[in-house]
Each structure stands twice: as structure tokens, then as C-alpha cells.
Image (tube, helix red, strand yellow):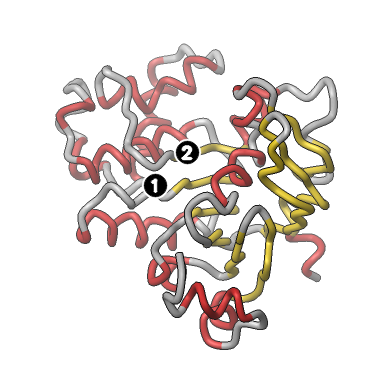
Amino acid sequence: MMEKTLKMESKKIDFYYGSFKALQEVSLQFHLNRVTALIGPSGCGKSTYLRCLNRMNDLIPSSRLVGEITLDDMNIYESGVDVVELRRRVGMVFQKPNPFPKTIFENVAFGLRVNGVKDRNVLSEKVEISLRQAALWDEVKDRLQASALGLSGGQQQRLCIARALAVEPEVVLMDEPASALDPIATQKIEELIHELKKNYTIVIVTHNMQQAARVSDTTAFFYMGKLIEVNATENIFTRPKYKQTEDYITGRFG
């Protein structure tokens, strides 16, 4: 039964920056309509791993990946894979909100235009749908032509989520999406993640243990480039199998 829901999978991947091995034999599965949290101390490889899932690390000279990552059984590192199309299917939201210095409307429409959508009615419809999905429509519908840079930090981050959703991805990667936000804005992002998982596969990197416990179905603990343990979130936080995991979640290090 679970097999049909498998959306992405990494199989024993190693990742190098030059001669430095940042990830070692990481095998992990991501299922449809599930949120997976990647946790671990700074520098443990969780963000590097996240960026492997949509080949963001390709932009770093002398980086290379050994192993296989599949999206619907397609190896995304095979030669001939259209990386632009891959990044449409596997969208990304970064740690700091990074809206373009354009209007709110044009921020959300950006990816659609890149993908060749020109019809104004289609753009307007998709922009509204995406802003609704990102729980932002009611706050900005009367100022779509205002600069996105005038929004609050939390609104900017939801705008970036809307921008990622506009091109209809299948997987959404989030790299500490609430770390720059205040508690109220953070709560909105977390509520949004709960809503979004009805339609997407979500992978979130977070350094906030309570956040991982609140938003994820599965939690994966990374330490020094290795995946130490992965399990249902409740089990990781109440019955971890390994002492390293227990030490980290109880605050003994990290």
C-alpha cells in the first residue's frame, strides 16, 4: 500500500564539496501528502541534503553526488534531465524571505511567465489560487500592484510560498522557512504546512524541535553527514532508538 505513495527517494547518496564528504550513504523516502522534517545540529548536512533533492547544489563548483535520487522512479541525476523542469516539480522556499523587487502580482506570476504563460486571465487566476493556497490572498488582494518589499517578513515568506506553488510543483522543499519570523508569523507558516500537505509532498529543514514535532509526520535526524535515524515523528521524540538522537532532542548538544 505504501509503495504507491512513494514520491521521492534517495538511495545511498554521498555528496562532496571538492574533497570534503558532506553526506554519507543517505537513504530516505518521501511519501505523498506527508511532511518530513530534517533535524540535526548546524553543519550536519541537512540543508545540503535538501538542496540535493532539486539539484540546487549543481550551482556550487566542484560539488558532486554519488548515488541515486528518484522522483516518481526517474533518476533526477541522469544526464539529459531538464533541471528547470525538475525545479518546477520540486519547488523550494528558503530560510530568508526573498521576494523579487517587483509587485506582489509579478512575484507570484514570475515562474508562470518563465514557463510561457502569457494570457492575463490565466495569470490572474493562477496568482489568486496560489495566494489563497499560501493563506495570503485576503491580506493582499487590494494591493496586488504594490511592491512585494512593502510586506511584513511573515507575509513575504508566504508570498515566496505562493510563488513556489504557482508553477504547480509536486514536492515543496522548505529550508528553515520560519527561522527569520516572529512567533505569530511562524504559527501561520506552520498552519499553512498542515493545509499544503493535502496536495503536496513536503520536506522541511528546521532547527526548532517543537516545530518539527508540530508539523511533521516523519522526522529524520542527521549528524555529521549521516542519517542516524528516521521514524514517525512521535517515535523519534518519545522513543528514539539511538543515544545520539536522544542526546540531541533532549538538548545535550546541538
Q: Residue at x 59, y 83 (%)?
A: 235
Nearer to the camera, 203 or 191 = 203
* Tag 1: amino acid: Gln
Q: Amino acid at mark 2?
A: Leu
- Is 6 displayed left or right of 249 in the figure? right
The residue labelled by disc 2 is 165
**Above or below for 85 versus 169:** above
Split into 4 quadrants, where in the image is the N terminus? bottom right
Bin the neighbour count of mark 1 within 10 Å (Cα to Cα): few under 14, some 14-19, many 20 and up.
some
Image location of residue 25, percent across then percent down: 79, 53
Residue 133 badge: 1
Q: Earlier in the sequence, mark 2 or mark 1?
A: 1
Q: Is residue 194 above or below residue 15?
A: below
Dot 2 and dot 1 residues touching (CB under 8 Å)? yes
**Which residue is more in the foreground, 247 or 191?**
247
Instruction: Label 2: state its secondary structure.
Output: helix
Q: Position of residue 66 (x, y in %)?
A: 82, 39
